[in-house]
Amino acid sequence: MAAEKRPASEAFGSSQLVVKRQKSNIDVGNTQAVAISDGSARRDGALVQAVSWIVRVSDFERHKGAVLDLHWSRNSEVIFSASADMTLASWDTETGLRIRRHEGHEEVINCLDVSKRGEELLVSGSDDGYIYIWDSRQKRAIDEIATPFPVTSIALTETTTELFAGSIDNDIKVWDMRNKSMIYTLSGHIDTVTSLQISPDQQTLLSYGHDGTAKTWNIQAFAPADRQIKSYVGAHTGLEKNFVRARFNSKGDRIIAGSGDGTVVVWDVQSTKLSYKLPGHKGAVNDVDFAPNEPIIMSGSSDRTIILGELNT
């Protein structure tokens, strides 16, 4: 079991789910639709690019705690979420209804990832110190890996043979999924690693931490001893020290991250330039992601909402 646990807190409140994006003819009299845009101001020296957020909220189904991690299904028809209420959930993006709730963790679930091929598997990491492996069609976990610390971030390789896990010890550990053994460790962050993702070409790992930096790492088989590639700054962790996430887009040329100041930031991978700083949320933005096949981004926040928006390209 874990050496330290963080109890699930009722202070997070309940979460609401945004379920549908519409591209035109928004009825501002409809209280279920909200559009927000900002295209002029500069914050922290970065241009706030114009963006429209279209929101529809379902009041029928919701998490009982903050939404801490989000992922699209491969066909973009389902959103998977991890929550402080100790459950995972799958949501139909067309109807807004919950498809399934996945139970088993004993503490806050900080992170999840989805397999890239074969059967659709989910992996989750929790303050209970366990990594659970799930069949997305089943409510209970099908396998587990015990770790000595709370698991704060997680990423699964395309082949589903290696798993990267961040923790409160500031390191990233790499696990062999076949025999549940640790292969090697990536060190460089000086505070808790809150986010991990593997690039689309499977050659680079993206990490973000409470030290306020995003980093890229060479994870190829014959990489040099120093695997760190670049660092990115501009996404604030905030006083709450939430587990803020960072993601690649489908081309691997952009990085998106949440922020403790309620904004979403987007970087150019090669130049490390901060390209977008997008407002909209009233609380810390805990998780963000690009849709696989569209310039659509989603963000989940401690303000209990998930927002879907479209970047101007």
Image: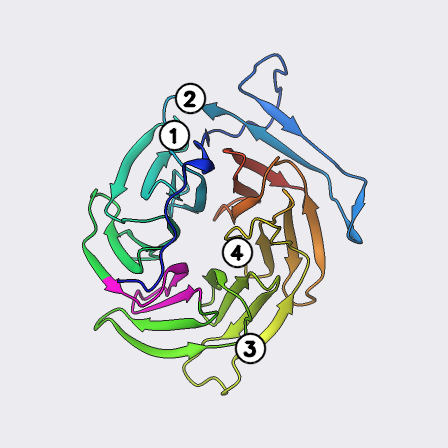
Q: What element does badge 1 sit on?
A: loop
CA neighbours of label 1 inside 10 A, class few (<14), some (14 to 19), many (20+): many
Q: What element does badge 2 sit on?
A: loop
Magenta-colored span: 145-168
Residue picked out by circle 2: 59
In reply to whether residue 159 is colored magenta, the answer given is yes
Instruction: Name the image quarter holding the N terminus.
Output: bottom left
Q: Which of marks 2 and 3 is nearer the N terminus?
A: 2
3 vs 1, front mark: 1
CA neighbours of label 2 inside 10 A, class few (<14), some (14 to 19), many (20+): few
> How far across and how far down the image is residue 224, in percent?
50, 87
Mark 3–mark 1 Cα distance, whole angstroms, equals 39 Å
**Could you tell me the amino acid type at mark 2?**
Asp
Residue picked out by circle 3: 228
Residue 130, label in figure: none
Residue picked out by circle 1: 62
Q: In which quarter of the image is residue 151?
A: bottom left
**Image: 288 above or below 217:** above
**Could you tell me the amino acid type at mark 3?**
Gln
**Could you tell me the amino acid type at mark 4?**
Arg
Q: Which of marks 3 and 1 is nearer the N terminus?
A: 1
Q: Quadrant of residue 139?
A: top left
